[in-house]
């Protein structure tokens, strides 16, 4: 099992030093997310200050970008990092695509994401072979790549593509076409075992693939701290995250598996009433412990490993890595030590 960290740098100039710190602590990978900032730019800087760790997006939103735009960015990052870049893609939901990105939602996310990945690989093949570009699909079609716009071959042309999702259809697609799958942090081990793994295996079987070829990765909800005050604040933070996701009907399939449908409906109603700051108080400890790993810093990495061994290939914590943050330093140091012992 590999251990990764996620960063949300609000200052691009910090990405170089963050990359050095992640590698020095012995972690395996550094992920960025598409939130307040572009997910690709920090990786270009981290690539200059690291030699070993994987660098990837967890996730970049696919549909607002043409596959050609994404293919070009990924190609340059793969060359710059000498083959360490992983392209993680997500569909997002309709309201974000239409109202945040002002892009078109065609209401066929599985079909669109399948063609997105297929067209990426067709584009990369044309780049590597300096050849013609031919791809025809229902959503995407490519057939024009003059030599002036072809960047040409690189040393590491195979770029791993991870996709993400919650429901079985996207999990099946992961098994069918992806190199990896980003599991949403809002999950339980029961959901992993009974929905995600079987769906990935079904997709892999349909494509004649080994399901073990699909690497499962997740930034896990964890509650930890070195003082009662830190643990209390961390508990509020994670319960707030759980309440936020539980308020969205598309995540209710996770809750319903455990008989928590009423809880999801309650969170949805509170969100409609705008009571976001109060919702964490409604999250019972039973749900917290089922979704999050709760432990002090010295026990946390071992509890994560015990829970997810055989279920995930790559794990991390669902909070950003910040070398300057003293309150979390001990958490990262224990994670680093635990990795060294287990490797």
Image (spheres, grey):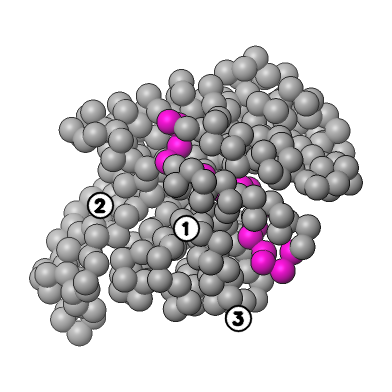
Q: What is the CA distance from the residue labelled 2 to the residue labelled 1?
A: 25 Å
Task: Please indicate whether residue 95 sits to the left or right of residue 158 in the image.
Answer: right
Whether residue 192 is visible to the viewer of this picture, yes or no, is yes
What count of labels does the image hold? 3
Relative height, residue 210 to residue 122 (above, below): above
Q: Is residue 296 magenta?
A: no
Task: Please indicate whether residue 49 sits to the left or right of residue 318 in the image.
Answer: left
Residue range (magenta): 310-325
Classify mark 3: helix, strand or loop: helix
Residue 60 in percent (x, y) is at 48, 58
- Which residue is labeled 3 in the image? 13
Q: Earlier in the sequence, mark 2 or mark 3?
A: 3
Task: Please indicate whether residue 71 sits to the left or right of residue 251 in the image.
Answer: left
Front in this rendered view, residue 203 or 105? 203
Classify mark 1: helix, strand or loop: strand
Residue 104 in percent (x, y) is at 46, 55
Residue at 71% across / 55% down in the picture?
330
- Which residue is labeled 1 in the image? 29
Front in this rendered view, residue 190 or 112? 190
Residue at 74% across / 22% down in the picture?
286
Residue at 34% across / 53% down in the picture?
161
Whether residue 241 is visible to the viewer of this picture, yes or no, is no
Residue 52 in percent (x, y) is at 40, 65
- Which residue is labeled 2 in the image? 118
Front in this rendered view, residue 314 or 122? 314
Q: What is the CA distance from the residue labelled 2 to the residue labelled 3?
A: 34 Å
């Amino acid at each position: 099992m590999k251990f990764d960290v996620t960063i949300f740098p609000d200052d691009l100039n910090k990405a170089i030093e963050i990359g050095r710190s992640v590698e020095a602590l012995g972690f395996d990978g550094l992920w960025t997310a598409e939130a307040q900032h572009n997910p690709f730019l920090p990786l270009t800087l981290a690539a200059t200050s690291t030699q070993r760790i994987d660098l990837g997006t967890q996730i970049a939103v696919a549909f607002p970008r043409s596959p050609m735009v994404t293919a070009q960015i990924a190609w340059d990052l793969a060359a710059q990092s000498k083959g360490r870049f992983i392209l993680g893609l997500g569909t997002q939901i309709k309201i974000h695509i239409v109202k945040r990105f002002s892009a078109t939602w065609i209401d066929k996310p599985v079909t669109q994401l399948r063609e997105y990945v297929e067209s990426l690989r067709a584009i990369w093949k044309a780049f590597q072979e300096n050849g013609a570009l031919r791809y025809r699909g229902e959503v995407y079609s490519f057939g024009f790549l003059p030599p002036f716009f072809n960047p040409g071959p690189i040393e590491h042309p195979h770029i791993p593509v991870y996709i993400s999702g919650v429901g079985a259809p996207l999990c099946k697609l992961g098994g069918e076409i992806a190199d990896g799958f980003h599991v949403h942090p809002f999950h339980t081990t029961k959901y992993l075992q009974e929905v995600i793994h079987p769906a990935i295996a079904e997709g892999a079987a349909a494509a004649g693939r080994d399901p073990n070829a699909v690497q499962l990765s997740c930034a896990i909800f964890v509650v930890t701290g070195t003082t009662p005050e830190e643990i209390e604040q961390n508990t509020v933070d994670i319960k707030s995250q759980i309440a936020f996701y539980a308020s969205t009907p598309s995540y209710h399939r996770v809750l319903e598996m455990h008989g928590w449908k009423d809880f999801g409906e309650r969170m949805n109603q509170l969100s409609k009433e705008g009571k976001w700051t109060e919702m964490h108080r409604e999250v019972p400890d039973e749900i917290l412990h089922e979704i999050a790993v709760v432990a002090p810093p010295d026990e946390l990495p071992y509890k994560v490993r015990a829970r997810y061994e055989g279920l995930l290939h790559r794990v991390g914590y669902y909070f950003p890595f910040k070398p300057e943050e003293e309150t979390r330093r001990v958490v990262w140091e224990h994670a680093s030590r635990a990795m060294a012992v287990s490797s």
